[in-house]
Image (cartoon, helix red, strand yellow):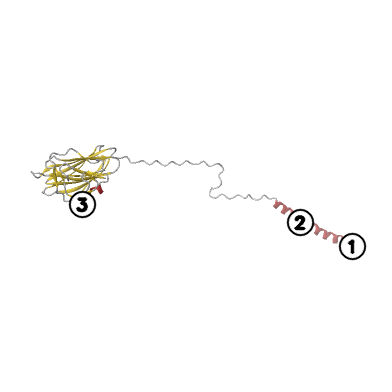
């Protein structure tokens, strides 16, 4: 009887223990799942790369230096000259866009000039030793002139005959680049060119000579600017005459542009 009771207890106890342990295992697993489900989720924050994250405070613009105003160059008194050969033919009206003058076509003391040039090129008091010539190896032409409206193939001009005699000219000067071209010559003499600005600067000179009886010619291109409104003055003077009759400088034409 007792043996049967023990066997009966074991038969009921063993399955119950298995069931109990199973229940405990299920409860324990459920607790683990619940605990993991309560863990806080990681924040969805974009990682900061290279320190370029969103600023935490309002950015203050850094002022940039303003561009320096352009400074115009200060005008200076400047004269540059070039002596060159004269072309076989010279069209004064095409070259002298501001003014032009020719000497001696109609007489010793006559000037043929641009009718609309406003007398920009002026000559000083004529020298008493002035003589008209027709010895220029180059020919001049023009249109729109006064008192002679049109001319072609002109070889005339004027010349001086004594040391110290010659020609003085002037033209307007300003802060803009201006070009004055002189068509001069020499017969049996030595002459000197002197150019100056009324506003200051250096005086520019040049000297050359012709020992023969034929005329030697040259074109002086004078490029100039001045520091203000003024004038440019030119002297073309005979330094020495090599001919007792008449030797010295000559003047044919001038243009301004």
Neighbourhood count class around disc 3 (C-alpha, 10 Å): few under 14, some 14–19, many 20 upward: some
Q: Nearer the viewer, residue 165 or 34?
A: 165
- The span from disc 2 to disc 3 (Cα, nearest Å) is 124 Å
44 on left or right of 5: left
Tell me the number on the disc at residue 4: 1
For the residues bearing labels 2 and 3, Cβ distance under 8 angstroms: no
Q: Reading the chain from its start, which is encountered first: label 1 or label 2?
A: 1
Residue assigned mark 3: 89
Query: Which percent across, then down, holds residue 211?
Result: 11, 48
- How far apart are the two marked residues, 1 and 2, measured between alpha carbons? 34 Å
Most extreme residue toward the right is 1
Q: How many residues crowd mark 2 within 10 Å: few (<14), some (14–19), many (20+)?
A: few
Considering depth in this image, is 43 or 2 the residue closer to the camera?
43
Q: In which quadrant is the C terminus drawn?
A: top left
Apparent side of residue 176 relative to residue 212 in the rendered image (left or right): right
Image depth: mark 1 or mark 3 in front: 3
Q: Residue at x 85, y 62 (%)?
A: 11
Quadrant in which residue 199 is drawn: top left
Regarding mark 1 in the picture, which secondary structure is present there? helix
Q: Nearer the viewer, mark 1 or mark 2?
A: 2
The tag earlier along the polypeptide, 1 or 3, is: 1
As rendered, which of 141 and 55 lies closer to the eye? Answer: 141
Q: Helix or strand or loop: what does disc 2 sit on?
A: helix
């Amino acid at each position: 009887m007792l043996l049967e009771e023990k066997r009966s207890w074991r038969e009921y106890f063993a399955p119950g223990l298995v069931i109990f342990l199973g229940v405990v295992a299920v409860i324990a697993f459920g607790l683990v799942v619940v605990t993991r489900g309560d863990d806080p989720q990681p924040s969805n924050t974009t990682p900061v790369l290279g320190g370029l994250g969103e600023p935490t405070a309002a950015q203050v613009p850094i002022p940039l230096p303003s561009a320096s105003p352009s400074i115009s160059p200060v005008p200076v008194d400047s004269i540059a000259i070039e002596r060159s050969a004269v072309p076989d033919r010279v069209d004064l009206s095409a070259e002298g866009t501001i003014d032009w003058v020719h000497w001696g076509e109609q007489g010793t003391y006559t000037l043929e000039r641009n009718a609309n040039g406003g007398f920009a090129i002026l000559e000083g008091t004529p020298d008493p030793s002035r003589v008209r010539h027709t010895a220029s190896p180059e020919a001049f032409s023009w249109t729109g002139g006064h008192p002679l409206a049109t001319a072609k193939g002109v070889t005339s001009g004027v010349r001086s005959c004594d040391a110290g005699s010659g020609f003085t000219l002037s033209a307007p000067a300003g802060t803009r680049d201006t070009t004055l071209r002189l068509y001069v010559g020499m017969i049996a003499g030595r002459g000197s060119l002197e150019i100056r600005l009324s506003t200051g600067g250096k005086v520019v000179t040049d000297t050359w000579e012709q020992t023969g009886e034929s005329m030697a010619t040259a074109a002086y291109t004078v490029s100039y600017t001045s520091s203000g409104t003024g004038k440019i003055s030119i002297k073309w003077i005979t330094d020495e005459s090599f001919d007792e009759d008449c030797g010295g400088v000559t003047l044919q034409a001038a243009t301004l542009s």
